[in-house]
Image (tube, rainbow, N blue to C red):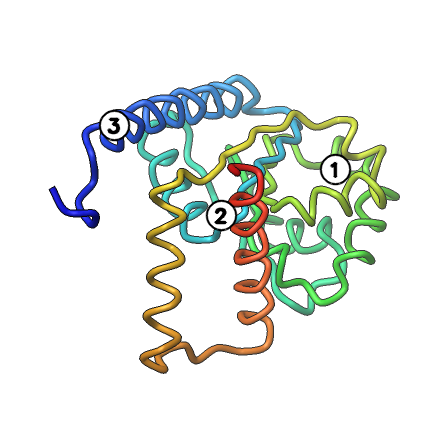
């Protein structure tokens, strides 16, 4: 067996990890299903956009309610208004918010969300799921502690093999000069690489 081939232990660890992740996804699906028709704030911590997208796709398969995904824009200043404008004509079963890492004035958005937290509860009769990374979570605790205190939190970490694949893919794109992105996309990649570095440090 060459060094590049995954070992039997790697396959076993991967299967165990996938099983734990599926269980967490099912628990998240249950939390959503049991909260339909009422406001419930759920924070999902995930540091990698590609992993987040896969998790959302899988969650949509196993969840019994229709999940609507709202990608907030860089220029959005208030989370409440962004949701209200998108779903003013309907009451969705569940709303998931992605893209908070790209908001230019995230501190303003989080502070505003904390100030109008009662409006969320009064007017959004559905589970609201915010996908955030570790850095956003720190800001949320600091700038919107009252809103954060209402939330339940789920964590989805990346596996070692997924992290290796992510780094290799990023490196290959970089060296082949295929990485063409905006400043915001660069900042997102920088955050993901910093998360990868923390993961590696913790694993040592």
User: Dot 1: what SS?
Assistant: helix
| Residue at the outermost front position | 2
Q: Report the disc number at residue 69.
A: 2
Q: Which percent across, then down, holds residue 29?
A: 45, 25
* Relative to 131, 57 lies left or right: left
Q: Which percent across, then down, holds residue 184?
A: 59, 71
Residue positioned 79% across, 27% down in the render: 149
Which quadrant of the structure image shows residue 7? top left
Q: Which residue is mark 1?
A: 120
Q: Which percent across, then down, holds residue 3?
A: 21, 47
Query: Is tag 1's residue or tag 3's residue first in the polypeptide sequence?
Result: 3
Towards the viewer: 66 or 195: 195
Q: CA distance from mark 1 to mark 3?
A: 47 Å
Q: Nearer the viewer, mark 1 or mark 3?
A: 3
Q: Which residue is mark 3?
A: 9
Towards the viewer: 139 or 99: 139
Check contact, mark 1 vs mark 3: CB within 8 A. Answer: no
Above or below: residue 145 compared with residue 171: above
């Amino acid at each position: 067996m060459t060094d590049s081939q995954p070992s039997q232990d790697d396959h076993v660890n991967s299967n165990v990890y996938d099983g734990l992740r599926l269980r967490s996804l099912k628990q998240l699906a249950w939390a959503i299903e049991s909260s339909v028709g009422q406001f419930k704030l759920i924070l999902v911590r995930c540091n990698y956009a590609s992993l987040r997208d896969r998790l959302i796709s899988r969650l949509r398969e196993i969840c019994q309610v229709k999940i609507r995904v709202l990608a907030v824009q860089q220029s959005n200043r208030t989370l409440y208004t962004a949701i209200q404008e998108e779903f003013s004509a309907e009451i969705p079963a569940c709303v998931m918010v992605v893209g908070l890492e790209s908001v230019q004035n995230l501190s303003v958005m989080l502070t505003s969300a904390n100030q109008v937290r009662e409006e969320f509860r009064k007017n959004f009769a559905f589970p609201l799921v915010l996908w955030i990374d570790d850095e956003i979570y720190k800001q949320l605790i600091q700038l919107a502690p009252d809103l954060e205190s209402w939330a339940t939190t789920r964590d989805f970490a990346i596996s070692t093999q997924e992290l290796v694949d992510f780094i290799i893919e990023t490196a290959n794109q970089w060296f082949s000069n295929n990485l063409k992105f905006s400043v915001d996309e660069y900042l997102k990649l920088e955050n993901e690489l910093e998360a990868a570095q923390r993961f590696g440090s913790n694993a040592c």
